Amino acid sequence: RQAGRQAGRQAGSMGRVELLRRYRHFVLDCDGVLWHSAEAIAGAVEAVRRLRESGADVVFMTNNSTRTREAYLSKFTELGFDGVRVEDINTSGSAVAEHCQAKGFDKVFAIGETGLVDECRQLGIEVVQDGGSGDAMDDTEFARTETDAGVKAVVMGWDRTFNYRKLSLASLYLQGGAQLVATNPDASDKVGGRFMPGNGCAVAAVQYSVNDPYGERTTVVGKPNGKLIDSLLDKYGFKREATLMVGDRLDTDIKFAVNGKIDSLLVLSGCSTKDEADQAADEVAPTFVADDLRAALDEPLEPFQQG
């Protein structure tokens, strides 16, 4: 098994005391772990409070780029998660902005919502957006469209107004030499018990438009990019062996942990199921599985065994 599972296997069954002795740093996903849409998951507020009261470090990493970190802070407060600071919150939008700044991408074409755009602008990155009208683009307009030569990257986050016009403009920028930088490849998000199309659907469309169906020329900055784990460990001074990633998705959260060589806890309160975990390949296999965050603290955790 991958390194992300080894520590948990060696530990054997552990209750809350053993869990908090081994792991002193917790990186929590938000959607599916702490809340569903505008409602906190049962027991999540209390679980976060208990983790903090134990002296553990608790920070948050979400692939949802529709809000800024400041807007997320308001949501934490509204749902009753006390004591959270803006510096505890990390989004795929803020990660994209930091990546673009580091790469010298000082002007970008953005497909995304306020969270992504504002995070880029806060770091002094000039953001170009679709200035046209309507959702369509016919062949005549496509042939005549002149793109901004200063744009160095197309940045993509979840955009619930994504349309053919935005797809066409992104394709034109990429054909002109811009780099594609995506917040995440999430196929869907669980909303109201059903799966709502996620950012990965739009990213795939843009990739196909430039004959890159496997995303070989795309940089995904958010989860599951393992380099983001390194950035978080450096940012907060966390020790790798004492850090636990908690998420609800095998393909992003757990793969993120495996790529970053830290242990992981899959909670079944969101997208991925126990059956999917049982059938998971090594690169998305969790260290532990629990029904939800509260159960992880209340019930003994066994190192996860597939099947």
Image (cartoon, grey):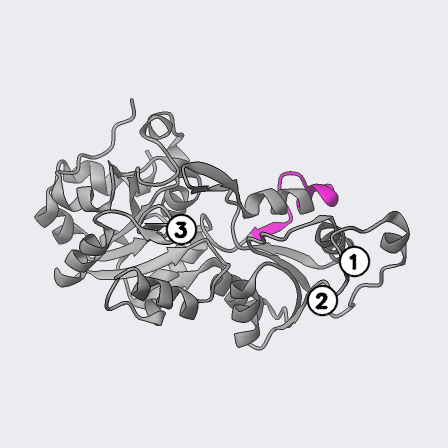
Q: Position of residue 226 (x, y in %)?
A: 43, 51
Total marks shown come to 3
Q: Amino acid at mark 2?
A: Val
Image mark for residue 206: none
Left/right of residue 293 with respect to residue 144 in the rendered view:
left
Left/right of residue 198 with respect to residue 172 in the rendered view:
left
Q: Sort mark 3 into few (<14), some (14-19) or many (20+) by Cα contacts within 10 Å.
A: some
The residue wearing badge 3 is 37
| Quadrant showing the C terminus | top left
Can residue 55 be seen here? The reply is no
Q: Is residue 185 magenta?
A: no
Q: Amino acid at mark 1?
A: Gly
Q: Report the Cα–Cα distance between label 3 and label 2.
A: 34 Å
Looking at the image, is 192 positioned above or below residue 152? above
Q: Position of residue 46 (x, y in %)?
A: 18, 55
Q: Nearer the viewer, residue 168 or 16?
A: 168
Left/right of residue 225 with respect to residue 132 in the rendered view:
left
Can residue 182 be seen here? The reply is yes
Image mark for residue 151: 2
Q: Is residue 211 magenta?
A: yes
Q: Amino acid at mark 3?
A: Ser
Q: Write down the quadrant of residue 114 in the picture.
A: bottom right
Left/right of residue 19 with respect to residue 3 in the rendered view:
left
In terms of secondary structure, where does tag 3 sit?
Answer: loop
Which residue corresponds to the image point at 21% horizontal and 36% vertical from the top-left? Answer: 9
Q: Which residues are magenta?
A: 207-219
Which residue corresponds to the image point at 85% horizontal and 53% vertical from the top-left? Answer: 142
Q: Are marks 2 and 1 in contact (CB under 8 Å)?
A: yes
Which residue corresponds to the image point at 41% horizontal and 42% vertical from the top-left? Answer: 255
Q: Write down the quadrant of residue 54 in the picture.
A: bottom left
